[in-house]
Image (cartoon, rainbow, N blue to C red):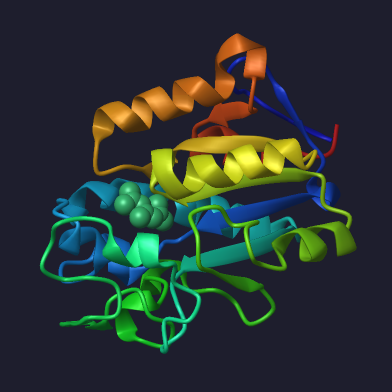
Amino acid sequence: MRVIAARPYEFALEPRAAALLIIDMQRDFLEPGGFGAALGNDVSLLRSAIAPIAAVLTACRAAGMLVVHTREGHRPDLSDLTEAKHRRGRFTARIGDSGPMGRILVRGEAGHGIIAELSPAENEPVIDKPGKGAFYATDLEAILRGKGITQLIVAGVTTEVCVHTTVREANDRGFECLVLEDGTASYFPKFHEAALNMVCAQDGIFGWVAPAGAVVAALQQGES
Ligand code: TIU
C-alpha cells in the first residue's frame, strides 16, 4: 500500500488493484484545427496537463500498474453519433466535417489520435468511446473488472466534461477515484477548479484530488 497526500485526506493506493486512466489526450482537443477549436476554445489551455500526466505515466509503468487510454470519437459513417450531439452548437465545423487534421472527431483520422507525448504502449488498452463518459457504450468496465481493478487514478481532458462524467460513472460502479489536479485541464480555468472541488468536497463525495508529484512520490516510496 502507498499513501498519497491528497484532498480531502490521504489516499491509500494499492498499485496491484489500481489503474491509471488517461482521458482523451487527443490532438482533436489539444491542437488547432480539431474539435476543441471548432467549439470556439483556446486549445493551448490544455497543454499544462501534458507534463504532469507524463510523469505519472512513467511512474505507473515502472510500478507495473495497468494504464488505460481513452479517445472520444465516432465511426466514419457516424452511425454511433447521436443526432443531438451532431446538431448541437452554432459553429461552422461539425463532427465528421473535414479539417486540417482530417475529419473532426472521427476514428482513424489524425486528429483523433493521442498526442505523441503520451503515446500508448502496445500492451495498454485504448478505449474508443462515443460519449463523454468512458463507461458509456464501451468495454472499459469489463476490462477493469477482469484485471481486479478497484482504484483509478484519473487524468486527461477536459476536467468538467469527460473527466468528470467518467469519475461520476466510476464512482457509482464502486471504483475509488483519485483525480490529478495538474494532470487534468479545461478550456475554462474556473470550471477546472470548481470541478476538482466538486470531486473532493463533502469529505470526498466522488473521490480524491492530488497533484502528480504526490502520486509519483508515493509510487517511488517502498511498500509500507
Ligand atoms: N468540450 C469539452 O470540454 N470536452 C469534450 O467535448 N470532450 C472531452 O472532455 N473529452
Residue 87, compared with residue 98, is above or below; it is above
Is residue 111 or residue 66 the one in the foreground?
Answer: 111
Residue drawn where x is 17% and y is 63% of the image: 38
142 sits to left or right of 200 = right
Residue 4 on image: x %, y %: 67, 29
Query: Can residue 221 be seen?
Result: no
> Which of the 4 quarters of the picture holds residue 9?
top right
Residue 49 on image: x %, y %: 37, 48
- Outermost residue toward the front? 83
Residue 116, compared with residue 65, is above or below; it is below
199 sits to left or right of 41 = right
Residue 136 on image: x %, y %: 62, 58
Residue 54, compared with residue 163, is above or below; it is below
> Which of the 4 quarters of the picture holds residue 99?
bottom left
Which quadrant holds the C terminus? top right
Residue 73 on image: x %, y %: 43, 72
> Which of the 4 quarters of the picture holds residue 183?
top left
Residue drawn where x is 85% and y is 57% of the image: 145
Residue drawn where x is 18% and y is 53% of the image: 44
142 sits to left or right of 29 = right
Query: Can residue 85 be seen?
Result: yes
Residue 47, compared with residue 224, is above or below; it is below
Is residue 79 or residue 74 the one in the foreground?
Answer: 79
- Outermost residue toward the left? 92
Which quadrant holds the N terminus? top right
Give the total of numbered labels: 0
166 sits to left or right of 112 = right
